[in-house]
Image: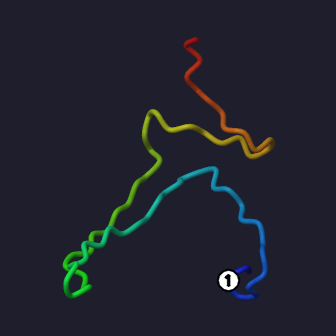
Amino acid sequence: KSFRTQMPFPFEIATDDVKMNAILVTVDSNSKEAERIKRIRIDSKSEDSTGYDSDDGKPEYFNNNF
């Protein structure tokens, strides 16, 4: 909605199957043209990832070894 109306609108925080997508661009400093574009995708299926508890807005830490 915020993209269509240009008005602020809160996004819902993902709580399941979280992914991060990005690109890394290598630019020639003389010609200012892209030499290389690399896609980056990171999935949240890591064992050290922090869960998110959507009812209070604070992350849940599953490592209780303290």
Could you tell me the amino acid type at mark 1? Phe
Of the 4 image quadrants, the one containing the C terminus is top right
Residue 24 to residue 32: above or below: above
**Which image quadrant is residue 7 in?**
bottom right
Q: Nearer the viewer, residue 44 or 5?
A: 5
Question: Mark 1 = which residue?
Answer: 3
Drawn side of residue 64 relative to residue 53, left or right: left
Give the residue at x 78% y 72%.
9
Which residue in the rendered view is the most extreme toward the front? 30
Position of 38 with respect to 2 (left or right) is left
Report crowding for label 1: few under 14, some 14 to 19, many 20 or more residues within 10 A (C-alpha). Answer: few
Between residues 13 and 29, which one lies in front from this camera angle? Answer: 29
Which percent across, then down, holds residue 44? 47, 47
Relative to residue 31, is residue 16 depicted above or below? above
The residue drawn where x is 61% and y is 29% is 61
Q: Secondary structure at mark 1?
A: helix
Residue that appears at 24% across and 86% down: 33
Q: Quadrant of residue 27?
A: bottom left
Q: Quadrant of the N terminus?
A: bottom right
Residue 36 appears at what percent x and percent y?
21, 75
Total numbered circles = 1
Display coloring: rainbow
Q: Is residue 45 left or right of residue 10?
A: left
Can you tell which quarter of the image residue 46 is in?
top left
At which x and y percent is residue 31?
A: 21, 88
- Residue 1 falls left or right of residue 42: right
